[in-house]
Amino acid sequence: MSILLGNLADALNAKLHGDKNCRIDRIATLQSAGPGSISFLANHRYRGYLSETRASAVILSPADWPECPVFALALENPYLGYAKVASLLNPESASPQGIHPTAWVSTKAIVDKTAWVGAQAVIEDHVLIGARTYIGAGCVVNSQATIGDSSQLMANVTLCRNVVIGKRALIHPGVVIGSDGFGIANDNGIWVKVPQLGTVRVGDDVEIGANTTIDRGALEDTVIEDGVKIDNQVQIGHNVYIGAHTAIAGCVAIAGSVRIGKRCVVGGATAIAGHLNITDDVYLTGASQVTKSISTSGVYSSWIPVQKSLVWRKNVARLHQLDEMARRIKALESTGKVLSGDES
């Protein structure tokens, strides 16, 4: 489909610089764009490509507009503008309705007539599937699970018993929600399983990336609030509570009974130890190791950025000598041979 540039400006509430009748039919990067394309500049690292772009128009900030050689839509958040334009130019196709002949649906399940259940899917007893919901091929929805209106389960998603999914969820292939949490008790060196009696409750407008796993609660439920966005291959332990509009990048591991506040960002490969509380509006940079609760909003980091191997090896060697170095410095300071930090 194509949209007039003036209509895009209205949709974004953006300042239009150029011909409102310019027709846009696709979105592309600054480097690859051609006539009919709209591009965007949201990261200053790519500013060098702006002067040479062949796009018909560019979405950018007001500060970057004077350097733009083509038509422009100027707004304060160009990346958000890009996201909205991409959706407008690429509307989702209508979902099919009905039940595929190879699907197995319990006669005790309730499936809205406008929903779709795909090939080889299994829908067990007392499942409730809302209007316009899409259940992809190979999905398994165990007994008494509930899926809200307009949600999408892509291929091979598993919802275990009693799981609740809100409205407009997007759950990508291979996700498992509601499997048992890692609850074990030690009996003189022998591990005894602790029954996991809770479930998982997922709010509205949640997206969960491929092959992510979310464990059911032990006694209380695991809760994912409205608007949470979770990337691929994330592990969320039992009894975790994630506040609304938090974003979690790939390969994060969250141990049991962690509470994460609203509007947090968890960088990729971060590990969060169990039974911690993280307040609202916390940003954890990638590969952070969180071992204590965070009560003040802000940006937190705990990992060493990459460096040449030889430098890293030397630093690790020095790290193992810190206790001895501290002892020697203390001894020298006590004899007056080392100046304290406030002396000149």
Image (tube, rainbow, N blue to C red):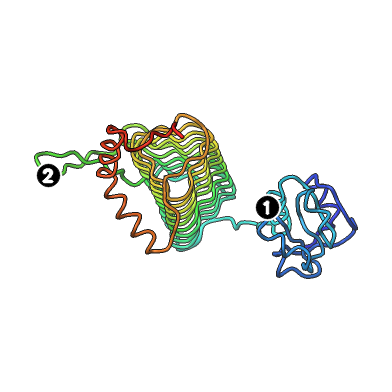
Q: For numbered disc 2, what is the local secondary structure?
A: strand
Residue 272 placement (x, y as % from top left): 38, 42
Which of the two discs, 1 and 2, labels the residue nearer the N terminus? 1
Residue at (74% x, 68% y) in the render: 33
Provide the residue designation for mark 1: 83
Residue at (43% x, 50% y) in the render: 287
Q: Is residue 60 left or right of residue 96?
A: right
Residue 106 visible to the viewer: no
Q: CA distance from mark 1 to mark 2?
A: 52 Å
Query: At label 1, which amino acid type do we have?
Result: Ala
Q: For numbered disc 1, what is the local secondary structure?
A: helix
Q: Quadrant for the N terminus, please.
A: bottom right
Provide the residue designation for mark 2: 190
Query: At label 2, which amino acid type do we have?
Result: Ile
Can you tell which quarter of the image residue 239 is in? top left
Q: Is residue 232 above or below residue 162?
A: below
